Amino acid sequence: MRTLLRLWPYVRPVRARLLTAAFVAVVASCTGLVIPLVLKWMVDGPVADRDPAGVWLGALCLLLLGVAEAVLFGIRRWLVARPLSHVEAEMRADLYRRLQRLPVAFHDRWASGQLLSRGTTDLMLLRMFLAFPLTFLLVNGVTILVGLVVMLLQDWVLGLVILGPAIPVMWTCVVFERRYAQVARRAQDQVGDLTTVVEESVLGIRVIKGFGRHRSQARAFRELSGRLRGTELRKARLLATIWGVIVTLPEVAIGAALVLGAVRVADGDLSAGTLVAFLSTALALRWPVDSIGFLLAMSQEAATATERYFEVMDEAPEDRGGDRAARPRLPETRGLRFEDVSFRYPDAPPGSPPLLTHIDLHIRPGESMALVGATGSGKTTLTALVPRLHEVTSGRITLDGVDITAMSREELRTKVAVAFEEPTLFSASVGENVLMGAPDGAGKPELDRALAIAQADFAHALPQGTDTRVGEQGLSLSGGQRQRLALARAVVGRPEFLVLDDPLSALDVHTEAAVEAALRRVLADTTALIVAHRPSTVLLADRVALLSGGRIAAVGTHQELLRHNAEYAHLMSGEQEDTR
Ligand SMILES: Nc1ncnc2c1ncn2[C@@H]1O[C@H](COP(=O)(O)OP(=O)(O)OP(=O)(O)O)[C@@H](O)[C@H]1O
Ligand SMILES: [Mg+2]
């Protein structure tokens, strides 16, 4: 209950409609309860008196009541359909917005399939809950109460017989709820795991095929889905048990009432009409009682879905940045500066040493600094600290003397542009992909300039030029082509600070040289940090910093380091052999 109450903010805007719909449903349901009273009048009146006209009149009344009930239920549906799809859409949009604003550390921690299933299956369960169980638990409750009162008024002895099973049925419901909650949670989590497997194998289809792993992959999938099936079967079994209890006990009570009633009619204690009315009321209550089982089940699933939904929504998003108090400007430190920066991943094993310790590095305005280090030494991590994809554990990073935590993220991210190791393109046109890196309103001239710098003129030769769609839903590009588009995206906004993570790794020597020549022109007035593995990329930079053992081990020009630093010489010479 408490979990479901959290849905209130979303339901609030449509509460009037939902309440009206519930009211209409209660009226419709109670209309159904008038039918037995008409039957009673018919049996005791026209039927006993053999009056055909009276029977026809009664039949007409029954028909009208039936039609009214149907129309009212139809109106209820019409009332709830539109607002509820609105609620679902709102919740989905909120979830998406939150996912965009959650820190990278959150996404590192969560499997994407779990997020995906929350945005799809769980929200669908919630909409179904709002449409159906929410209303009908109320409607059926009222109907059952009204029906019981009607029956007790008809004949209180028979009424008590019918009421007999109430306590065992309620007890079953309570026990059932508790068990079902656990199984429902497990099932929904397993759907998330299954989604993750499907997603990974679709993305990794080349690896799976290339290594002939489709069989073992299918086996792994079958195992997971078998586990989910087991959980679903457990759910079905629980549901069957409760259904059995809820259906059988009242049915037995109705049978007992029928026998007792028939005896009393024979004795002349009870009119035949009353017995007919009593039994048809009891029968009319069968559906409201029977359905309680699966209404409770659906509510339980909805509660679980709500819980899973809010697990994501309750995560703290990135702060907006811009702590004015920390904004004193130190004019002597222009450029990009790391001051005693240490960092460890929040999800690193406890007790492990920080990945980066006491990093001090100053990149002067207009200077470009290459960052060199063995693979896994933390270069990518260090570059990710500048646009605040991860937060420093201690120390600080300043841009022109201003602490990056003192700027709003928006300001920071217009100042700093990044190209990542893995060049990601979205399902959009080449132009849109590149212009993501520019302020709104940038157009063709900026696009052409960026493509020229990144030597990505191939884009003009694509089937629809720069309007060609790329990404998942579009044309597949080669690794080097994607890398050059990512580079174009980084330079298109003429950023003051540029962070490039091994931007030229996938290019052939000639293209690399051409990109370098163009980049040099851009880098002349940009402060840049460039992760590099190859000497040719290092030569782009004015100075080189060597990252080793989580520290900046040496800073100097390529030639100086080559001469005086054995580790650097080793790193570079190995690479040189590779490229030649
Ligand atoms: N999200 C993360 N959570 C925990 N540890 C991580 C995470 N990402 C990376 N690491 C660890 O941090 C270390 C440094 O990774 P990083 O990607 O910064 O290396 P790198 O220097 O860029 O390597 P390469 O040259 O291969 O690109 C690795 O040992 C890696 O296991
Ligand atoms: Mg890296």
Image (cartoon, rainbow, N blue to C red):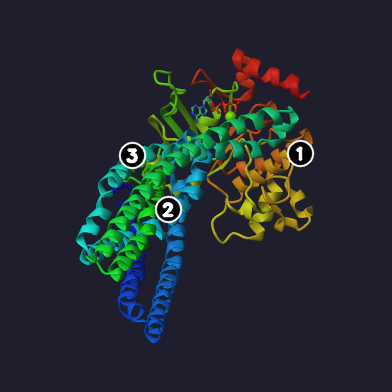
For label 1, the SS is helix
Q: Marks 2/1: CA distance? A: 53 Å
**Is 494 placed above or below 136 here?**
above
Give the mark nearer the N terminus: 2 vs 1.
Answer: 2
**Disc 3 Cβ-to-ligand 1 distance below 8 Å:** no
Residue toward you, 178 or 306: 178
Q: Is mark 1 within 8 Å of ligand 1?
A: no
Q: Answer left or right for 15 relative to 477.
A: left
Q: Tell me the number on the disc at residue 511.
A: 1
Circle on res. 178:
3
Q: Nearer the viewer, residue 91 or 502?
A: 91
Q: Secondary structure at mark 3?
A: helix
Q: Which mark is residue 126?
A: 2
* Residue 151, percent from left and from top: 25, 63
Q: CA distance from mark 2 to mark 3?
A: 19 Å
| Picture quadrant where residue 350 is located | top left
Image coordinates for residue 62, horizontal then vertical, percent: 39, 77
From the viewer's perspective, is 507 left or right of 503?
Answer: right
| Residue farthest toward the top in the current orientation of the protein | 566
What SS does tag 2 mark?
Answer: helix
Is residue 328 visible in this depiction of the protein?
no
Give the x, y percent position of residue 580: 78, 23
Question: Type of residue at label 3?
Answer: Arg
The answer to whether residue 191 of the structure is visible from this angle is yes
Label 1 crowd bin: few (<14), some (14–19), many (20+), radius 10 Å: some
Distance from the alpha carbon under mark 3 to that under mark 1:
65 Å
Classify residue 142 as left or right of residue 95.
Answer: left
Residue at 74% over, 21% down? 578
Residue type beneath disc 1: Thr
